[in-house]
Amino acid sequence: MNHQKLAVGIIVLILVSSALLFFLSMQGSPRARVFIRANGSVEPAAAPIERNGDNYTFTDDVHAELVIEKSHVVIDGAGHTLHGPYNGTTENLWVIGNGSDQVTGGTQIPYSIGVDLSGGASSLTIMNLDIRNFSIGAYIWTARNSFFNNSVSECVVGVLLSGSENKIGRNLMATNEVGLFFGTNEPGTVPLNLTVSHNSFVDNIRQLGGCLCQESNISEPIHTWDDGEEGNYWSDYDGTDANGDGVGDTPYVFDVQNEDRYPLMESLVQLKKGTESTMVLPVGFEISALAAIAVAAIISGVLLSARRRKRNRISADNVS
C-alpha cells in the first residue's frame, strides 16, 4: 500500500510541476505569437491552424497574436477566438499614438496586435474570426485585403485601417475603446478606394476615430463610410426610418470630414458569447512541457507494469 501511495504521489507531483512550468512560461511570454511564415509554414507547429494550400483554418481557439507574413492567403477563423493579454484596466491600457513602449506607474505596458500583417503581406482574406483583448484587434495597413464576418471586441482599438483598396464588411466591432481607427501610413497620405459597409459598431466608447491633420483636412474629400447604397449599423444612431427600408433617413455624421450616408437601422451580427478555449504553446515551450508530460506518462506506465508483475507473482505463489 505504501508503494502505491508513493507512486500516486510521484505522478501527481510531476503533473503539477508540468502545469506550473506551463503557467510560468506563459507569464514570461506576454506576447505569445503564431506565425504564418512567408514560405507558408505555421509556427509553432502545435498551433491549431490547418493548412490546405493557401487556406489556413483555425481548428481551436488561440491565446496569441497572429502574425501573417505570406500574401494571397485566406485565414478562416471558423468561429474560433483569438485571445490577447489586454485585461481592460487602466494599468493595462495601451494608448494608440503614444508609441509601443509605454510606461504607467513605472511598469511597461505590454501592447499587442491580434492580426498583424508583417513584411508587407497583402491581398489577404481574413474571415470568421472572433478577436478579443488586444491593444489593436486587427492592423490593416497594406493594400487589397478583405476583412469579413469577424467579431472584434474588448480591445483598445478594434480595427486600425491605414492601407488603400481594402474591404471591411459584415464585421462586429463592439465594446472597444475605439471601434475603427482611420489612420495614415505616411504624413499627408490618405488611404484610397476603401469599402466599409454592413458592419455593426456596438457600444464602443468611440465608434470611429482617426488622425486629425489640420493642414491637410481642408483638401481631403469627405470620407463616406458606406458603399453608395447601404452603410453600417451604429448603436448610437438616433435617426428614423420613415419608409421602413432598413436605412436611416439622415446620415450618421462623425465630424465635418466623416459620415455614413446610409446608416443601417439594425445590426446584422451579434456578439459571440465567451467559451472555454485551448492555450497555444508559445515558441520554444513545446519541448519542455511535452517532455515533462511524457516523463509522467512513462513513469506511470513503469509503475503500473511493476504492479501487474507483482500481482502475477503473488497469484503464482498462491497456486503453487
Image (spheres, rainbow, N blue to C red):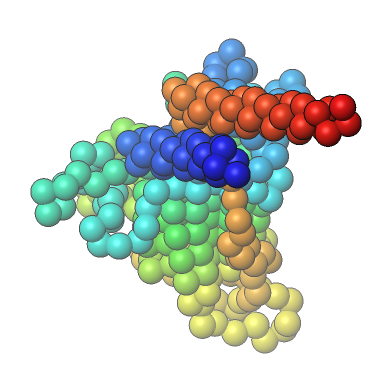
Q: Is 197 above or below relative to 238?
A: above
Q: Position of residue 152 (x, y in %)?
A: 53, 55
Camera sees residue 144: no
Q: Position of residue 224 (x, y in %)?
A: 51, 57
Residue at the top extreme, as displayed: 39
Q: Is residue 90 left or right of residue 44?
A: left
Q: Which image quadrant is residue 36 in? A: top right
Q: Is residue 219 left or right of residue 22?
A: left
Residue at the right extreme, as displayed: 319
- Residue under the point 48% across and 77% down: 236
Q: Which image quadrant is residue 49 in? A: top right
Camera sees residue 9: yes
In which quadrant of the rendered image does the N terminus lie? top right
- Residue under the point 83% across and 33% down: 318
Count of numbered badges drawn on the protein: 0
Q: Is residue 35 left or right of residue 209?
A: right
- Residue under the point 47% across and 24% down: 288
In which quadrant of the rendered image does the C terminus lie? top right
Along the line of sight, which residue is nearer the eye, 265 or 15?
A: 15
Residue at the left extreme, as displayed: 106
Q: Which image quadrant is residue 294 in? A: top right
Q: Position of residue 253 (x, y in %)?
A: 44, 69
Q: Is 251 above or below relative to 84?
A: below
- Residue under the point 70% across and 39% down: 59
Q: Is 18 above or below relative to 218?
A: above
Along the line of sight, which residue is nearer the eye, 180 or 300?
A: 300
Q: Position of residue 302 (x, y in %)?
A: 65, 25
